[in-house]
Amino acid sequence: MNNLVTIVYQPDCDQQFTYDLLSKVNEQLLVIDNSPNYNDLKELRESLKVSWLWNQGYNLVYGLGLNEAFKRLSSDNVIYFSSKRSRILDNGWIEDLVRPLADRRIGMTGCLLSFPYTSIVQDCRFGDYYKYPQVHIQGGVWAARLETMLSNPYSYRFPHVFSDVWISWKLQSVDYTLMDVSSIKSVASGKAVKSSRAKFIHEY
């Protein structure tokens, strides 16, 4: 099964941090570059020898950048992780994310967090959100089949904030299940991770 790892590079990410992080990934890489100038990341781009999509200086941020990536991919699976505040502890994290996708009932894997139906969700007009398990895959790291994401792209209404909650709701509304992967941890910035099984940690 062909896996492709995609990251969205935001202008405020540290280049050396990103290089160190990406150098630990052995899969095929596509970087969505939201930086304002093409030459800002020339050294990083050339040293990594990865596929690079620059957005002509326009910051597509999270969801819209990923939508552009989906159109350019030919892999079976897409794995996303943030290049900001992430740590790879064990290279087995990719296999852990991808393995459950063999079950076609699973729409996305990652770190499953609760997100109860509140006035915020109501104001965002997620429709029948309350009918589904009020959880979401945190947007800092996840995996899905490419065909699933092409059929269910991110909403232009939520290009960044609430995009992970929205896509989780969308997938559940078309009968997909979200799956928690125990070795993938998304935690609030500065919060300690107590699990000794963690292979990938993202701070949001």
Image (spheres, grey):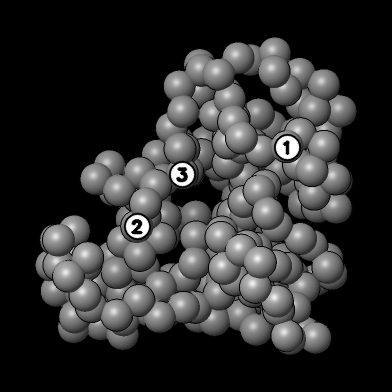
- How far is disc 3 from disc 2 in space, using C-alphas? 10 Å
Q: CB atoms at circles 3 and 2 under 8 Å apart?
A: no
Residue at 60% from the left image edge and 14% from the top image edge: 37
Quarter-of-image position of residue 132: bottom left
- The part of the image, by quadrant, that contains residue 19 is top right
- The image position of residue 110, as x and y in percent, is 56, 72
Helix, strand, or loop for circle 3?
Answer: helix
Using the numbered discs, state the Cα–Cα distance from disc 1 to disc 2 in whole angstroms. 24 Å
Q: Under tag 2, what secondary structure? A: loop
Q: Amino acid at mark 3?
A: Tyr
Q: Residues within 10 Å of mark 1 (few under 14, many from 20)?
A: few
Q: Which residue is mark 3?
A: 62
**Tag 2 residue:** 162
| Residue 193 percent across, percent down from the top left | 71, 79
Q: Amino acid at mark 2?
A: Phe
Residue at 37% from the left image edge and 51% from the top image edge: 161
Q: Are marks 3 and 1 in contact (CB under 8 Å)?
A: no
Where is mark 1, residue-wise?
A: 14
Lower position in the chain sequence, tag 1 or tag 2: 1
**Numbered disc 1: secondary structure:** loop
| Quarter where residue 35 is shown | top right
User: Badge 2, how many Cα within 10 Å: few under 14, some, many 20+?
Assistant: some
Query: Toward the viewer: 76 or 90?
Result: 90
